[in-house]
Image: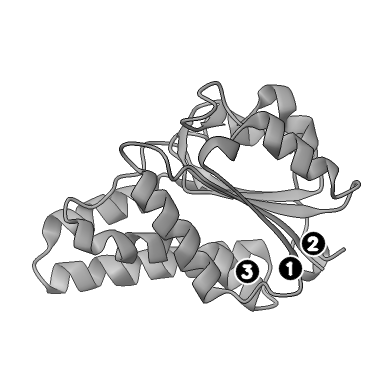
Amino acid sequence: MLNVIFVSDDKDADIGTNCALSHNHLTNEVDLQGNNVVLLNGDLCTSAEVEKTIGTFNGGKFILAAFSHGCEDALTSTADGSGYVHGGNSYYFGSSLVYTNCCYSGIKLKDSLIAEGCLGYVGYNDEVRLPRNPDDDVLFIACENSGLIHFLTTGDPLTASVEAMKTKYREQARSFLDQKMNVAAAFLLRNLNCLTFHESGTLTRDTLEN
């Protein structure tokens, strides 16, 4: 059984709708029935709730998938501007995979998590651009979520899943260019260029089963 925490800051005035779409897209693409899945959204997007939820796993391995704002050393939310994941609580994330579409967290938070034994991290070391046209949101989200979807639906390790993610980004950018949607393609490729990840050993879905 997998332990999975989704954090979706759906109350954020700027990106709340995108956060909700991201969570819904992923859960529509991956069947997680029979697993221990917890959604923290709205006022529950806090370090206290994240830490409390991890405590219920009794030391078991888990996945945290985060859809919110971020900064260099934290994943932040409307309910917890100082960060619901940060250097001070990174020790909670030993034996976990942290997967996020949050901006900037690959700069410092990634290293804090790795230092505490985090098994895998996927995120970004710069601003993650949203499309100018909201109709393209789901296409950007499909790229952002594709690594975790691949990881959870195949037996492939995290490195191969991230490579599949990069391919998804490039294919969607090519589709935009074919439709003369040059700005959308440029934004998407910029996001790809700031993608960063870490895998400790060979990390697969089976590795994270409890």
Q: Residue at x 40, y 66 (%)?
A: 142
Let me know if residue 50 appears in the view.
Answer: yes
Q: In the image as oriented, which residue stretches furthest toward the right?
A: 58
Residue identified by numbered label 2: 208
Q: Quadrant of the N terminus?
A: bottom right
Q: Residues within 10 Å of mark 2 (few under 14, many from 20)?
A: some
User: Who is closer to the viewer here, 201 or 66?
Assistant: 66
Residue identified by numbered label 1: 205
Q: What amino acid is at disc 3?
A: Phe
Q: Is residue 57 toward the left or the right of residue 190 in the image? A: right
Residue 127 image position (x, y, % from top left): 36, 37
Q: CA distance from mark 2 to mark 1?
A: 5 Å
Whether the residues at callouts 3 and 2 have beta carbons within 8 Å, the answer is no
Residue identified by numbered label 3: 151
Q: CA distance from mark 3 to mark 2?
A: 11 Å
Q: What amino acid is at disc 2?
A: Leu
Q: Residue at x 23, y 52 (%)?
A: 131
Q: What amino acid is at disc 1?
A: Arg
Height in image: 143 above or below 128? below
